[in-house]
Image (cartoon, grey):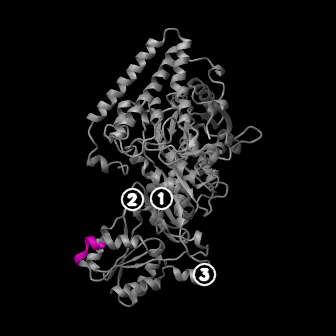
C-alpha cells in the first residue's frame, strides 16, 4: 500500500474514522464535535456518517466531558473525548488525574480506562495568556496516564490509532498550528505506531537535539542552517512524554556528547529539566558540555505578535544554544 | 442552632404504597443494617488501635438509606458512591471479610489494600466504588449510564452523594448532562445535615436540596425529574422511593431524590464536632434507623424478637470473623505496589 501525503488534520480524521469503523464501542464526545464538525474540522462529516449516538455533542462542561468519558470507559466503551483546547483541560484536571489515571490502580486492576482525550496545544496565535500554552508536561507528571505529542501527520495517524486500541487512558495532544502540515502516511487500516517510542527525525553526529511538536519544526529548520556551517544535529522526536523513551537519546548523546532540549512549554520543571537530569544520570562520563534548554520565556504569553514571538522558541534561539555547547 | 429533621420528614412507613416486601426480606435488611453498624463500630476501635490508617468516615446513623436504596436495585444495576462507602459496599453484598481486610490494608482486601476505606469496589457486584474527591464520581455515574443507553441495556445507575457534593461544579455538570442525554441515573443525595461541619443551610441556596432538580427540568416534563425528599431513617420509605425512582430512570431518564438522614458520628475520626451539640446528636440516637426498624418489626411480627436477637449475634460474629480474617491476611507485596499502574 502506497504512502500518500496527507495533512496532520486528515491524519487525525482518518485515524478516528477507521477506528470507529473497526470497533462499534469507539465513539466521540465533546464540544462542537458533531453539528459543527469539530472546531478544528477534524470530525467534519462524522455526524452524518456515524450518527448522533456515536458522535455526541456536549455542553461546555469539561469536568463531565472528561469524567463521563472515564465512567463510560470503565463500563466497557472506548470513548474518544475531545477537550477543545488544552487550556480548558485545566477545568478537567481532577477527572483526568485523579480518576482517568488512578482508577485502575486504586481498585487494584478491577477497572480499566480505555480512553483517549484529544486536545490541542500551543501558543503563537495571538490568543492571549489564557489560550496560549503548551502545558502538556503537567499531565506527564502522573503515572497511569499516557501523553502523546505527535509532530507529523504520519505520527499523528499511527499514534492516534494505537491510542484508541490501547486499554490505558491517553491524553492525545495535537498542535494547533500544525494541522496543515503534510507528510506521507500509509493507507493501511492497521497502521499503528508503538506507544512510548521516540523517533530519530534527523541523523547527525555533532549535537543531539531532543524535542517534539513545534520544537521539532523549529529544530529541523535550525539543523539545516547549522549544516551549512558544518554542524550536523541529530534530532530526536520524543513523540510521547509518557511513556518517556530516552534510550535513543542516551545512545545519541554517547556519540555527540552534547544535547539541546527544545520545547514550547515554560522553562521551569519542564521536559528539558527531566531529559537533562536523566542524561546526567546515565551519560555522565560522556558529557562534554552542559545540557542546554530552549523553551518559552517564563512569562504568560501576550497578545501582540511582536512580543509574543519574542517569548517563544525559534530556530535562531536553537542555533544559539547549539553553538553554546559545541 | 439545632437540627429538627423529623418535622421535615415524610410520614414514614405509613406511606408505603407498593407491595410490602415479605418478612424474610425485611429481616435481611435488618441483618444488613446491624452488620453495617457493628462493622463501623469495630472500624472505630481498630482506628483507635492504629490498625486502620488514613481517613475513616463512618456510616453510623445512615444505615437505612444505604440498605433501603440498594435493596431497590437488581443484580444488573449499578452502584457508585463517595468516600463514606462502607455501608453501601456491605449493602451491595461485599464480603465483610474482604471489606475489613481493605481497612487493614491487606492484599486480600477488595481493592488489594491499595484503595483503603474510601475506595471499596467490586466489579462483579457492579459496585463501582467509593471515591475520595467530593463529587468526583458523579460524572463517572453519567458515563456508566451512557454505556447502558449506548448498549441498549435495561439497568440503572444509583449514584449516591452527600449533601456537600451538591455544591461542587461536578454536580451541575454531571446532572445536567444526564438530563440532556436522558440517562438512567437515580441521583440520591444522602443529606446528613452537614458537609463536614457546615450545616446545609449555611452552604446551599436551596435548603431543600432536591429542588436542584428543577434546574435541569423543563415545563413539558422533560429533563430531570424532581423526586421525593424521603425519610432517610426509615428503610421502607427509602426502599419505596428508590424503587419508584429506579423505575422512572429505567423507563424515562434521570431523577433526583433526597434522603434526610443524620450522621451520628463525626465527619471522620477525630472530628471535634464543634458545629453541633451533644443534645442534638442524642436526639437522633433514640430515633436512629436500627432502633426504629426493630420496633417496627417487633410490632408487625409477633415473637420476632428471638430471630432479631439471633441476627444481632450473627452480625457480631461476622465482624469478629472479618477482623480475624483481616488480621491473619498478608500485607501487599512489592509486586502489588508496582502492579496495575497501567494495563499490560
Above or below, B191 relative to A117: above
Q: Nearer the viewer, mark 2 or mark 3?
A: 3
Q: Disc 3 or 1, which lies upstream in sequence?
A: 1
Secondary structure at badge 3 equals: helix
The residue positioned 70% from the left and 45% from the top of the image is: B215
Q: Which residue is mark 2?
A: A195
Q: Position of residue B241 (x, y in %)?
A: 62, 28
Furthest-left residue in view?
A285
Q: Disc 2 or 3, which lies upstream in sequence?
A: 2
**Chain holding disc 1:** A
Q: Position of residue B318 (x, y in %)?
A: 36, 25
Q: Which residue is mark 3?
A: A305
Secondary structure at badge 2 equals: loop
Left or right, A196 with reference to B134? left
Assess disc 2: are there few (<14), some (14-19) or many (≥20) residues with their C-alpha within 10 Å of its C-alpha.
Answer: many
The quadrant of the picture occupied by the C terminus of chain A is: bottom left
Q: Nearer the viewer, mark 1 or mark 2?
A: 1
Q: Which residue is mark 1?
A: A171
Report the front residue among B261 and B286: B286
Furthest-bottom residue in view?
A229
Are the residues flagged by discs 1 and 2 from a single subunit?
yes
Residues at marks 3 and 1, CA–CA distance in whole angstroms: 29 Å
Report the front residue among B74 and A82: B74
The quadrant of the picture occupied by the N terminus of chain A is: bottom left
Left or right, A62 with reference to B319? right
Amino acid at each position: 500500500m502506497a504512502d500518500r501525503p496527507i495533512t496532520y488534520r486528515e491524519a487525525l480524521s482518518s485515524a478516528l474514522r477507521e477506528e470507529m469503523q473497526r470497533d462499534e464501542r469507539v465513539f466521540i464526545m465533546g464540544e462542537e464535535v458533531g453539528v459543527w464538525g469539530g472546531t478544528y474540522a477534524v470530525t467534519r462529516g462524522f455526524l452524518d456518517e456515524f450518527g448522533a449516538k456515536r458522535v455526541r455533542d456536549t455542553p461546555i462542561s469539561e469536568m463531565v466531558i472528561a469524567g463521563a468519558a472515564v465512567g463510560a470507559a470503565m463500563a466497557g466503551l472506548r470513548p474518544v473525548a475531545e477537550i477543545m483546547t488544552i487550556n480548558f483541560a485545566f477545568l478537567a484536571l481532577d477527572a483526568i488525574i485523579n480518576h482517568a489515571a488512578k482508577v485502575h490502580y486504586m481498585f487494584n486492576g478491577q477497572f480499566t480506562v480505555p480512553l483517549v482525550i484529544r486536545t490541542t496545544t500551543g501558543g503563537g496565535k495571538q490568543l492571549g495568556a489564557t489560550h496560549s500554552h503548551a502545558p502538556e508536561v503537567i499531565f506527564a507528571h502522573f503515572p497511569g496516564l499516557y501523553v502523546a505529542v505527535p509532530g507529523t501527520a504520519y505520527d499523528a495517524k499511527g499514534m492516534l490509532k494505537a491510542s484508541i486500541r490501547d486499554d490505558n487512558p491517553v491524553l492525545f495532544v495535537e498542535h494547533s498550528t500544525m494541522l496543515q502540515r503534510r507528510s506521507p502516511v500509509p493507507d493501511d487500516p492497521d497502521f499503528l505506531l508503538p506507544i512510548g517510542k521516540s523517533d530519530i527525525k534527523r541523523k547527525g553526529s555533532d549535537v543531539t537535539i531532543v524535542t517534539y511538536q513545534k520544537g521539532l519544526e523549529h529544530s529541523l529548520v535550525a539543523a539545516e542552517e547549522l549544516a551549512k556551517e558544518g554542524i550536523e544535529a541529530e534530532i530526536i522526536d520524543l513523540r510521547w512524554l509518557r511513556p518517556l523513551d530516552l534510550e535513543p537519546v542516551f545512545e545519541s548523546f554517547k556519540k555527540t556528547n552534547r544535547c539541546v532540549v527544545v520545547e514550547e512549554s515554560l522553562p521551569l520543571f519542564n521536559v528539558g529539566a527531566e531529559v537533562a537530569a536523566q542524561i546526567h544520570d546515565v551519560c555522565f562520563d560522556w558529557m562534554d558540555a552542559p545540557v542546554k534548554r530552549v523553551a518559552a520565556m517564563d512569562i504568560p504569553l501576550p497578545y501582540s505578535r511582536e512580543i509574543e514571538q519574542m517569548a517563544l522558541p525559534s530556530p535562531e534561539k536553537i542555533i544559539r544554544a547549539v553553538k553554546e555547547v559545541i | 442552632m439545632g437540627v429538627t429533621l423529623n418535622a421535615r420528614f415524610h410520614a414514614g412507613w405509613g406511606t408505603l404504597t407498593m407491595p410490602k416486601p415479605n418478612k424474610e426480606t425485611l429481616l435481611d435488611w435488618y441483618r444488613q443494617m446491624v452488620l453495617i453498624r457493628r462493622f463501623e463500630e469495630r472500624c472505630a476501635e481498630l482506628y483507635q488501635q492504629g490498625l486502620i490508617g488514613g481517613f475513616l468516615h463512618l456510616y453510623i446513623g445512615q444505615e437505612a438509606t444505604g440498605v433501603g436504596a440498594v435493596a431497590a436495585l437488581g443484580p444488573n444495576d449499578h452502584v457508585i458512591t463517595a468516600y463514606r462507602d462502607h455501608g453501601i459496599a456491605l449493602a451491595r453484598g461485599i464480603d465483610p471479610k474482604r471489606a475489613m481486610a481493605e481497612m487493614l490494608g491487606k492484599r486480600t482486601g477488595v481493592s488489594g489494600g491499595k484503595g483503603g476505606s474510601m475506595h471499596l469496589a467490586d466489579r462483579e457486584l457492579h459496585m463501582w466504588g467509593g471515591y475520595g474527591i467530593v463529587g468526583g464520581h458523579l460524572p463517572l455515574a453519567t458515563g456508566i449510564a451512557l454505556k447502558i443507553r449506548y448498549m441498549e441495556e435495561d439497568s440503572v445507575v444509583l449514584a449516591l452523594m452527600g449533601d456537600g457534593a451538591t455544591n461542587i461544579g461536578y454536580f451541575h455538570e454531571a446532572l445536567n448532562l444526564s438530563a440532556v442525554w436522558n440517562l438512567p441515573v437515580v441521583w440520591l443525595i444522602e443529606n446528613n445535615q452537614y458537609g463536614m461541619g457546615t450545616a446545609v443551610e449555611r452552604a446551599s441556596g436551596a435548603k431543600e436540596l432536591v429542588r436542584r432538580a428543577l434546574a435541569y427540568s423543563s415545563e413539558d416534563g422533560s429533563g430531570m425529574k424532581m423526586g421525593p425528599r424521603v425519610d432517610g431513617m426509615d428503610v421502607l420509605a427509602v426502599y419505596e422511593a428508590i424503587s419508584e425512582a429506579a423505575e422512572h430512570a429505567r423507563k424515562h431518564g434521570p431523577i433526583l431524590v433526597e434522603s434526610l438522614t443524620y450522621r451520628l458520628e463525626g465527619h471522620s475520626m477525630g472530628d471535634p464536632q464543634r458545629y453541633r451539640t451533644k443534645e442534638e446528636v442524642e436526639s437522633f440516637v433514640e430515633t436512629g434507623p436500627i432502633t426504629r426498624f426493630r420496633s417496627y418489626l417487633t410490632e408487625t411480627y409477633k415473637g420476632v424478637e428471638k430471630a432479631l436477637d439471633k441476627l444481632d449475634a450473627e452480625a457480631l460474629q461476622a465482624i469478629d470473623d472479618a477482623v480475624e480474617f483481616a488480621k491473619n491476611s498478608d500485607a501487599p507485596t512489592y509486586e502489588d505496589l508496582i502492579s496495575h499502574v497501567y494495563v499490560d
